[in-house]
Structures are given as structure tokens and as C-alpha cells.
Image (tube, rainbow, N blue to C red):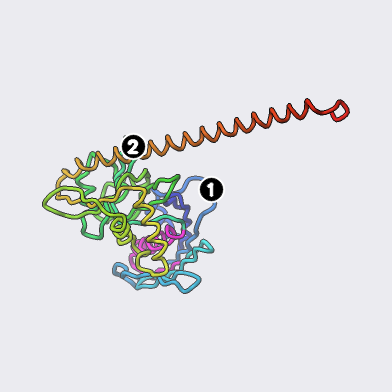
Amino acid sequence: MLDLAGWRVRLACRPAEFAAETATHYAPFAAAGDASPHLTIEVTLVGNAAASAPEAAQPAWNGTVWLLDASGFSGRIDLAQARAALTLDSATPQVHLEYFLRVLLALLAQHEDGLLIHAAGLLMPATGQVYLFIGCSGSGKSTVVRLSSGKGIALNDDLILVRPEGGDWMAYGTPFWNAETGDRAGQTARGLVAGVYVLIQDGAVYLEPCSPALATAELAINCPVANGDPTLASNLLARCRTLAETVPVRRLHFRKDPDFWQFLQPVAAEVGDEHATRNTQHATRNTQHATRNTQHATRSHNACNSMMSRRTPQEL
């Protein structure tokens, strides 16, 4: 059983040797306890016909389930029934299984009000805040992680899961790293999203503001799988708009040195202040609500005493 952004995903793999290999591969994400899974995936390795990496494939919605077929594997995903099945015919089954899991989690996130984003995520241990650096392949996500040694803990350098939580958005690490990245110590961590930065490699270092429409578009462009299916477009755009309205989204022009960090600290303080203000407002509303309840209880008590004083001994 895996714990991915709080979703418990059961992998039932056959044969036994492949199951053991898979358990070792995803060991850092092993779920604690024996709670029921949110989704179960039946995975069967039947051969080793495909020797190369999986082809890019977009899932197809047939009106009931999602179908995903490519060289080396054939899968179906039924989110309504919380089940999926995958048949592998591959000499590199872990590579093909990971590809399927990426697609499945993108669809599961859409189904559960979250987003899977092409992003590097860096957690600031002192504050619990996470910066997201978004961009397609080659935009510099892994470079940003390398340049940030000593600044934060990397949740991932390619794909991050985000979920709404109490008016904020939480970022979660995933197992889906670039292959050459060695240090993955923070991959099971999570934190409050403090800022989203669209990476633009440049000779100068500066931040460029994004309008709400541009911020929404930049986020949607970097949500794989979901942005490739018309049936998901409306929900995807609405969710990206909500994220953009909650968290600052800016374009980060940067070069291959850590100078960009000087621009990020003020943004973190700004978001932290906004978060503290929301907490204060929430506490104030709770206090006002409690005061109204006390006043209501006092009026009810006084009214009861008044009625009791007017009742005759026989009524008492």
C-alpha cells in the first residue's frame, strides 16, 4: 500500500518476484496502518516484449473508464469503482509501471480536487512553506533544485501533487523524479504552497508578475494528462484559477546561479503574513460566533426563568 499525497493506493502485483521488486522500489511511500485503500491497482507482468522506454500516450475516456494502451502495457482506470488494472509486457516493467502511475495520479488528482503539476518543489524547514518552480522538460526544474542546496529540501524535481486544504494549498512529494537525481530525502514531505514560479532561463534575474488569466494558463499548461483531454478542460481551468487566486504566481527569470533566492524571501514573508491574517480572521469569527451563542443561551435562560416564575404550583 502506497501513501501518495494522502491517497492510499494498493498495488497488487504478480508474479511474486515482480511484487517484491515493486515493494522495494516504492518503499519510502509505504503507507502506515491498515486503513482501506482509496484505489486498488491490479498489475500483472506477462512477458518482456517491450525493451524501450514507454511511448507518450494519452488516456482515452470511453464513457465509463479511462483506457491507456502503448507498447509494453495495456491499462484501464475506473475511478468511480476505485479500481485499475495494468498488464505489462516489458523488459523494463518498473519504467512502464511508473508511467502508468503518473497518468493514474493525474486523473485521480482531477477526480479528487487536486492537481499533478510539472514542477520542482522546495520545502523551507523553518516555515513549512513550499516554493513550486513550474515548467516543461528542459525549463530548469532540476537545475533550480541543484542551485538550492542548503536553501530547502526538495520534494521532487519533476512532478508535485497539490491539494486544497482549509483555504490553502498543500504540496506533496512524489516518487516521479528525473532519473539522474540522487538526493531524494524529502520526497515524502509536504508543506504549504507559498509561491509558484514559472521558470524562464535568462541572462538577468528578476520576477515578472502574472495576471490572473496568465497565471491560470501557465498552471494549466503544466498539468500533464489533464490538459490533454477536452472532457477535463473546464474543471482543470477552474481549479488552476482557484490556485492562482490563493497563491502568488510569478514568472522567474533566472540564470544558472543561486541569485534568484534574493527575490523569493520577501514573497514568502508576504504569503506568511496573508496566512496569519486569515488565521486571525478565522479566530475572530470563531470568537464572535461563540459570543453570539453565549448571548443566545443567556436570553434563553432568562426567558425560561421568566416563564417558570409565571407558572402555577400545579403546573410545576
Q: Earlier in the sequence, mark 2 or mark 1?
A: 1
Residue 276 place in picture, x, y as percent: 38, 36
Q: Is residue 34 above or below residue 64?
A: above
Please name the residue shown 34% across and 62% down the image: 224
Q: Amino acid at mark 1?
A: Asp
Residue farthest front in this picture: 310
Dot 2, crowdedness within 10 Å: few (<14), some or many (≥20)?
A: few
Residue 297 place in picture, x, y as percent: 64, 31
Decide whether residue 96 is among the magenta residues. yes
Please name the residue shown 32% across and 37% down the image: 125
Which region shows up in magenta?
Answer: 85-111
State which quarter of the image contains the C terminus. Answer: top right
Residue 312 located left or right of residue 305:
right
Give the camera-side residue of 166 and 120.
166
Callout 2: helix, strand or loop? helix
Q: Is residue 281 above or below residue 39?
A: above
Residue 140 place in picture, x, y as percent: 21, 54
State whether residue 17 appears in this view: no
Please name the residue shown 42% across and 52% down the image: 4
Decide whether residue 74 is among the magenta residues. no
Q: Amino acid at mark 2?
A: Asp
Give the camera-side residue of 46 and 157.
157
Give the camera-side residue of 131 and 21.
131
Query: Mark 1 = which residue?
Result: 34
Query: Mark 2 = which residue?
Result: 273
Please name the residue shown 31% across and 69% down the image: 56
Residue 252 located left or right of residue 173:
left
Callout 1: helix, strand or loop? loop
Q: Main secondary structure of the magenta part?
A: helix
